[in-house]
Image (tube, rainbow, N blue to C red):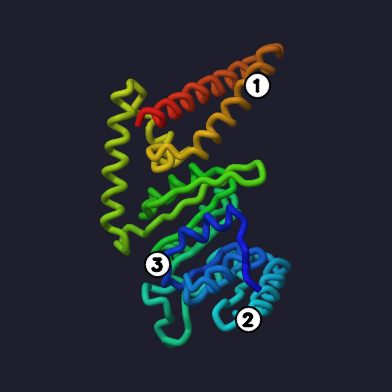
Amino acid sequence: MNIQLSKRMQAVADMVIPGFCVADIGCDHGFVSIYLIQNQIAPHVFAADVRPGPLSRAKEHIAQAGLSRYITPVLSDGLQNVPVSDGTGFTADDAAIPSAQAIVAAGIGGRLTVKILSDWPEKTKALSWMVLEPQSDIHIVRQWLAQNGFCILKENMVFEDGKYYPVLFAANVLKQIRKEEIDRIGQMNLSAKQKWERMGYDSAVWQECCDLYGMQLIVSGNEVLKAYLVHNMEKDRELLYNMEKAEGNERLIQRMQEIKDRLVLNQQILSFMEKY
């Protein structure tokens, strides 16, 4: 049973650093977990899901792949029942029993992702890194990471089946496994903000842009992000056109102004990406 991942899930798997024991949070059918073992990316994976149904199917797939020795299914609400390592990848009591050093969490809403990370703070603090693919509210995830000692070192965005999916890799600053990269990201952000200001744009909104769309995606001129911005602007213009035909009230006028402000900001980001 050789796993072929979707474009979205392949983007997630491609960000996993080889050699770490990984917990696949919200594993669904277990395909990412199996892929990480089959391709010798992770020595052990915890396939965790809060739902018994998907976890049961994951167990079947793991058994069919002959990987029950390397993948441990766990019925768990987030990190609750997942053993997390202090850095070695194995429990303190028995070096033969693995524990997670990092997590993958894909296909989960942004607010739920933050809840999962916040519910077990000691486990989250012990993680070396995480690969996240929030399905919504990614700005909340980016803000939480920055406020809780994680630095986003890499981002990607893929387009699949008519939808746009951002994927990010965040390292625990205290673990210093990528210290030079963390320093490089800080310098990149400072340089980009200065460029933003030189273009005459409001420096106060630069962080908002980064939270919404990802600093590295913006700076790299990511083509999928450009398409996403254009797509959103087309939707906003159509929405604004329909709203302008409606009878106005205070709330409608306020909403129209919010859309106009967003259109301006997104156009500024596109212009920045073209000239950076």
Q: Secondary structure at mark 1?
A: helix
Q: Which residue is pictured at 33% across the width and 28% down the height?
A: 196
Q: Which residue is pictured at 52% across the width and 71% down the height?
A: 39
Tag 1 and tag 3, C-beta contact below 8 Å: no
Amino acid type for the residue under numbered disc 2 = Gly
Q: Secondary structure at mark 2?
A: loop
Q: Which of marks 2 and 1 precedes in the sequence?
A: 2
Q: Which residue is pictured at 45% across the width and 28% down the height?
A: 270
Give the label on residue 66, or none: 2
Q: Which residue is mark 1?
A: 238
> Is 111 displayed left or right of 179 in the figure?
right
Q: Which of marks 3 and 1 precedes in the sequence?
A: 3
Amino acid type for the residue under numbered disc 1 = Glu
Give how far across and how far down residue 14 sits, in percent.
49, 59
Tag 3 and tag 2, C-beta contact below 8 Å: no
Amino acid type for the residue under numbered disc 3 = Ala
Alpha carbons under labels 1 and 3: distance apart: 47 Å
> Is 162 displayed left or right of 266 in the figure?
right
Give the label on residue 126, or none: 3
Q: Which of marks 2 and 3 precedes in the sequence?
A: 2
Residue 8 position (above or below residue 75): above
